[in-house]
Image (cartoon, rainbow, N blue to C red):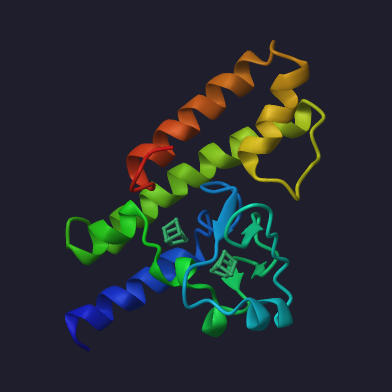
Amino acid sequence: MKPSEIAAAAAARLCLDCGMCCNGVLFQIVRLQPGDSVRELESLGLKLSRKKSAPYFRQPCEKLIECTCSIYESRPMRCRLFECRQLHRLENREASEEEIARVIESAKSAVENVKTLLLEAGNESLHLPLSERYDQVMAFESAHENLREAMEGLQQILNADFRMEPL
Ligand code: SF4
Ligand code: SF4
């Protein structure tokens, strides 16, 4: 195998254990790009919204099934092109697959902590992005200090380790 193929295989394994760029943790929406076919994507069941700007779909993506994209071969351009900071590190040989797997596990643990606190706060809107669920809770009750700290900690991890441009 060529080095590029080895890196691609490692990236695929890591993504199959992560899913944070599809499940509403990193992003709220995905906008379609030039080259995407609205008709084809809608025929595959992707629910597109067209309010004001370019069509987009919301996350958590309905096409993510158990951490796998169920329309992978036909996925939108943005999904094809996106690489998080960890995949860049892998590609540039700045970190091994094992090191990156540990970063992902740590982030997933922080996500689970936030999800647990959201449920304890009575939020069961599992169809919404994590940040929107957080905003729902905080709009009515600002005294969830544990949740606030957990969410702020998670956003620091996501900005430092995953997003190429911090939110
Ligand atoms: S956030 Fe990165 S590692 Fe996780 S699924 Fe997306 S591209 Fe893969
Ligand atoms: S279409 Fe596939 S790759 Fe794109 S957000 Fe949905 S599950 Fe992820």
| Identity of the residue drawn at 32% across and 76% down | 8
| Identity of the residue drawn at 70% across and 71% down | 46
> Which of the image's four quarters has the C terminus?
top left
In the rendered view, does 133 fall on the left or right side of 27? right
In the rendered view, does 20 fall on the left or right side of 1? right
* Residue at the extreme bottom: 1
Whole-percent x, y for residue 55 in the image: 62, 62
Whole-percent x, y for residue 131 in the image: 61, 36
| Identity of the residue drawn at 42% across and 71% down | 13
Foreground pick, 43 / 130 = 43
In the rendered view, does 58 fall on the left or right side of 160? right
Quarter of the render that holds ligand 2: bottom right
Does residue 84 lie above or below 110 as drawn?
Answer: below
Whole-percent x, y for residue 72 in the image: 55, 79
> Which of the image's four quarters has the N terminus?
bottom left
Residue 86 can be seen in this image: yes
Whole-percent x, y for residue 147 in the image: 63, 23
Does residue 57 lie above or below 69 as drawn?
Answer: above
Total number of numbered discs in the rendering: 0
